[in-house]
Image (spheres, rainbow, N blue to C red):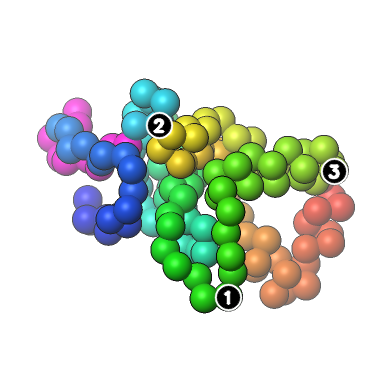
Amino acid sequence: MQRIEVCLEMKYTIQKRKSEVGTMDEVIKVNQIEYQIIKLLGHGKGGYSYLVRRDGKSYVLKQIHHEPCAYYSFGNKIEAEKNDYARLLQAGIPIPVMVELDEEKECLVKEFINGPTIYELICEDKWKSAICSK
């Protein structure tokens, strides 16, 4: 498994453990539940997103970071994530289900939906049909 670079500011510990097939997996605990890190999906102004797996199911783990951003001023990022999620749910916008939220470690886990990102849909001018078809 290729080595995954992680942000030095992350508040959790990635543990090494021997897997059933004898290779080394990178594992993260969120609320005492272990997730295997598959790969880095992306990095934005608020955090790093990783594809993770547990019990044969894929999820996205977002780890909040505190790197400076020249064009944006942040308050409490994890609180903003919670509020934004609630606001989108309330508006009836289809979004991935949040399955874990660890405020102390500033990370969250959401269901993984295989397919294009909202960014890709907007760039291809397909976002209206993708959202309205749900």
Determine which residue is flagged by label 1: 71
In terms of sequence position, does the residue under pointer 3 or pointer 2 come before the other? 2
**Left of 51 or right of it: where is 71?**
right
Please, what is the three-letter code of the amino acid marked with disc 2? Answer: Val
Viewer-proximal residue among 122 and 43: 43
Q: Is residue 27 magenta?
A: yes
- Start-end of magenta stretch: 19-28
Find residue 42 and report its horizontal and vertical position in percent. 46, 61
Q: Quadrant of residue 104?
A: top left
Viewer-proximal residue among 46 and 91: 46
Residue 26 visible somewhere in the drawing: yes
Residue drawn at x 70%, y 46% as measured from the top left: 84
Determine which residue is flagged by label 3: 91
Find residue 96 and report its horizontal and vertical position in percent. 64, 41
Residue drawn at x 65%, y 66% as measured from the top left: 119
Q: Dot 3, crowdedness within 10 Å: few (<14), some or many (≥20)?
A: few
Answer above or below: position of 104 versus 94.
above
